[in-house]
Image (cartoon, helix red, strand yellow):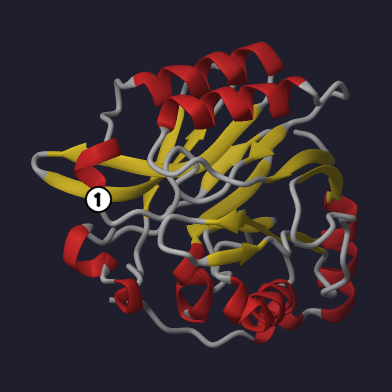
Amino acid sequence: MKNELKVALIQSDLAWENPEQNRQNFSAKIASITKPVDLVILPEMFTSGFTMNPNEVAETMTGETISWMKKISEEKNAAITGSLIIKEKNNYFNRLIFVHPNGNIDTYDKRHTFTLAGEHKVFTAGKSNILVNYKGWKIKPLVCYDLRFPVWSRNVEDYDLVFYVANWPKVRTHAWDVLLQARAIENMSYCIGINRVGLDANNHEYSGHSAAYDVLGKRKDTIPEDKEAIDIVTLDKKHIETYRNKLGFLNDRDDFNLK
């Protein structure tokens, strides 16, 4: 178990519906990280941008991007995660992939498909909430629109970190900032959000605002707005334990079940 977890936050533009170009771009960015890290987080649909044309870019769990992620994870001796479009049995999923350095994979299918963009008409929504166990840290991975639904991220497992990978548009940046901070405070956990920057083929603009918050809702990162950037933040188990023991807020959470 590690008391500290070093996380690389990669805020990037994305090449529209071009998995090969995006893999090349992220290979270069990850190679530029010279300090040891435990986890690398990429945005939502990092191989394609937020496209509603899954047939153009969908892959399988044995496809090129999964192989690429495994290779990167092994080379960096770090977990790597982000979401991409996966096809299974004629269904398309916006699937978050969490690759461990030993090659093991955890997956989470986006639960809340973004109805405003018609994502629910194209992609099959996930049904299961997962918890990733990595180096003694309990991690909850979620995707973009999930951020608006706090019950889905409710900390019933005493997890240490919740993170969101996203293509969150600039026009609703204020909501992104406020909700990320709220998820950290209400769950007494670290909360990280990784969002893209740039303009996509549908003329949607993305302003980044990727961030890492501690259990008190204080910023841990130094990522600038509106441009590509990489930052490494150090998360500390002692910080979590100190404030959970001191304040005890999670002891008073409501007891109910999701259905």
Measured from the top left, where is residue 3 in percent x and y? 84, 41
Measured from the top left, where is residue 108 in percent x and y? 39, 49
Q: Which residue is mark 1?
A: 53
Residue visible at 26% across and 61% down?
Answer: 125
Q: Is residue 171 left or right of residue 259?
A: right
Above or below, 29 relative to 42: above
Measured from the top left, where is residue 7 in percent x and y? 76, 41
Q: Residue furthest left?
A: 90
Q: Is residue 83 left or right of residue 207?
A: left
Above or below, 120 relative to 162: below
Q: Is residue 251 left or right of residue 133?
A: right
Image quadrant occupied by the C terminus: bottom left
Return the residue nearer the eye: 137 or 63.
63
Quick one: label 1, few (<14), some, or many (20+) residues within 10 Å?
few
Image quarter for residue 77? top right
Above or below, 152 relative to 89: below
Question: Across the whole image, how many numbered discs are drawn on residues?
Answer: 1
Image quadrant occupied by the N terminus: top right
Residue visible at 81% across and 38% down?
Answer: 6
Residue visible at 65% across and 11% down?
Answer: 75
Q: Secondary structure at mark 1?
A: loop
Above or below, 187 relative to 164: below
Measured from the top left, where is residue 166 in percent x and y? 54, 59
Image quarter for residue 219? bottom right
Return the residue nearer the eye: 172 or 140.
172
Residue visible at 80% across and 23% down?
Answer: 32
Could you tell me the amino acid type at mark 1?
Asn
Return the residue nearer the eye: 240 or 195.
195
